[in-house]
Image (cartoon, grey):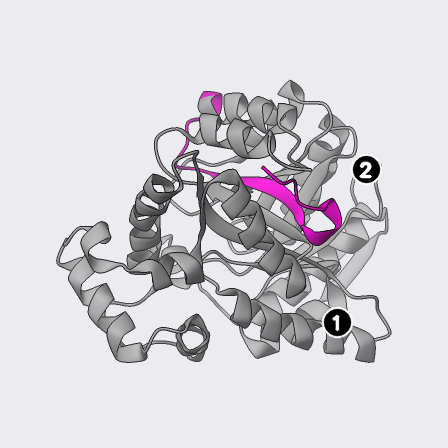
């Protein structure tokens, strides 16, 4: 196989989540590090396993790979608690902690009995508070959603400048990211064309604020196999699960969802029809054609996957974080990592 120039690729990481048992996460973490991946980002959602135990275990089981959570939300972790936990995680990992903050899934947060109030302002408040506490400041801050009064950590975190990434998709939140965050986190189910648009927005906002361009981390489902056709079939199941989770059954989509579909290259009526069929439990392989794989995943042989990853680098993604789908994630990680330049 002709090896791709490393300069044409984003950094490659692995996404884990609360649906994976902690001991399995540790084994995947060791495989990812041995295979040359640069990061392990854990997604945490309400009512799944809390991921901090797995993140901590992975930090102890590895030596070089970045480990963290993308994202934590400030509704069920007050910003002061985020600073406490990630300061300690950075100590444990000896400066490898990764921190992403986002507003989370509103319906899930409300199901916990919490108010999903002013999500963009909530994240802005959280980033200001967390950054100041990690810097070692004594902080009094009055935000629109979160505040602290004369607060300070009782220990000195190893990195007062620990980068803080912000999850954002809508134009307003992306602009805020450019103004205050060190990195932008882009969710699964986001076509490269949509990413290119919001990368432009975040860069312009950062420039106006006199700040450097934030890093751009994007999640994407992936299956890498020597049988490329089989890999593309396997990934369709993961795409189907994410589509039916992320898009409302009502058909009343947010402006962000409308924009994502518009950039996918799939007509809205076809997209809606596919969602309807998936919700009727028709098999993903019968519903989703190659446009869904091309728009929402990377899949195929290792060479195919690296070529598709390069497309994200061209639109501004600096780190592509792969959600390895299917029952043989460890083997797929080792196979793809062994083919990277």
The label number, if any, that marks residue 179 in the structure image:
1
**Which stretch appears magenta?**
1-23
Task: Look at 28% across and 60% down and name the residue there.
Answer: 289
Q: In this image, 50 relative to 316: left or right?
A: left
Q: Quadrant of residue 205?
A: bottom right
Q: In this image, 273 relative to 101: left or right?
A: left
Which label's residue is closer to the chain start, 2 or 1? 2
Q: Position of residue 36 (x, y in %)?
A: 66, 31
Give the structural element (helix, strand or loop) at label 1.
helix
Can you identify the residue that label 2 sits on?
157
Depth check, front residue: 216 or 287: 287
Is the N terminus in the top left, top right, bottom left or bottom right quadrant?
top right
Residue 296, above or below 70: below
Task: Look at 54% across and 54% down and name the residue there.
Answer: 308
Q: Would residue 240 be visible to someone looking at this image?
A: yes
Give the structural element (helix, strand or loop) at label 2.
loop
Q: Position of residue 165 (x, y in %)?
A: 67, 55
Q: How many angstroms separate mark 2 from mark 1 (CA)?
A: 24 Å
Q: Quadrant of residue 223?
A: top left
Residue 175, above or below 242: below
The label number, if any, that marks residue 170 in the structure image:
none
């Amino acid at each position: 196989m002709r090896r791709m120039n490393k300069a044409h690729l984003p950094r490659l990481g692995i996404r884990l989540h609360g649906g994976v048992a902690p001991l399995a996460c540790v084994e995947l973490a060791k495989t990812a590090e041995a295979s040359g991946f640069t990061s392990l980002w854990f997604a945490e959602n309400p009512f799944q396993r809390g991921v901090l135990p797995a993140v901590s275990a992975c930090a102890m089981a590895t030596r070089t790979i970045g480990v963290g959570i993308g994202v934590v939300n400030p509704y069920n972790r007050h910003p002061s608690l985020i600073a406490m936990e990630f300061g300690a995680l950075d100590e444990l990992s000896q400066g490898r902690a990764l921190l992403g903050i986002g507003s989370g899934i509103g319906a899930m947060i409300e199901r916990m009995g919490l108010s999903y109030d002013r999500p963009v302002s909530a994240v802005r408040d959280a980033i200001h508070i967390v950054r100041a506490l990690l810097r070692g400041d004594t902080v009094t801050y009055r935000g629109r959603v979160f505040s602290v009064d004369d607060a300070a950590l009782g220990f000195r975190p190893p990195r007062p400048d620990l980068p803080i990434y912000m999850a954002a998709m809508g134009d307003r939140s992306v602009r805020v990211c450019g103004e205050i965050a060190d990195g932008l986190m882009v969710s699964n189910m986001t076509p490269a064309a949509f990413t290119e648009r919001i990368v432009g927005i975040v860069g312009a906002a950062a420039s106006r604020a006199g700040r450097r361009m934030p890093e751009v981390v994007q999640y994407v489902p992936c299956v890498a196999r020597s049988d490329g056709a089989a890999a593309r079939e396997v990934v369709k199941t993961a795409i189907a699960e994410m589509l039916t989770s992320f898009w409302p059954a009502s058909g009343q989509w947010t402006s962000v969802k409308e924009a994502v579909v518009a950039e996918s290259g799939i007509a809205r009526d076809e997209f809606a029809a596919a969602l309807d069929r998936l919700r009727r439990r028709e098999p993903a392989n019968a519903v989703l054609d190659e446009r869904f794989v091309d728009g929402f995943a990377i899949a195929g042989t290792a060479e195919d996957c690296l070529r598709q990853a390069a497309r994200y680098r061209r639109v501004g993604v600096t780190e592509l974080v792969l959600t390895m789908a299917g029952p043989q994630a460890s083997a797929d990680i080792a196979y793809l990592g062994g083919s990277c330049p």
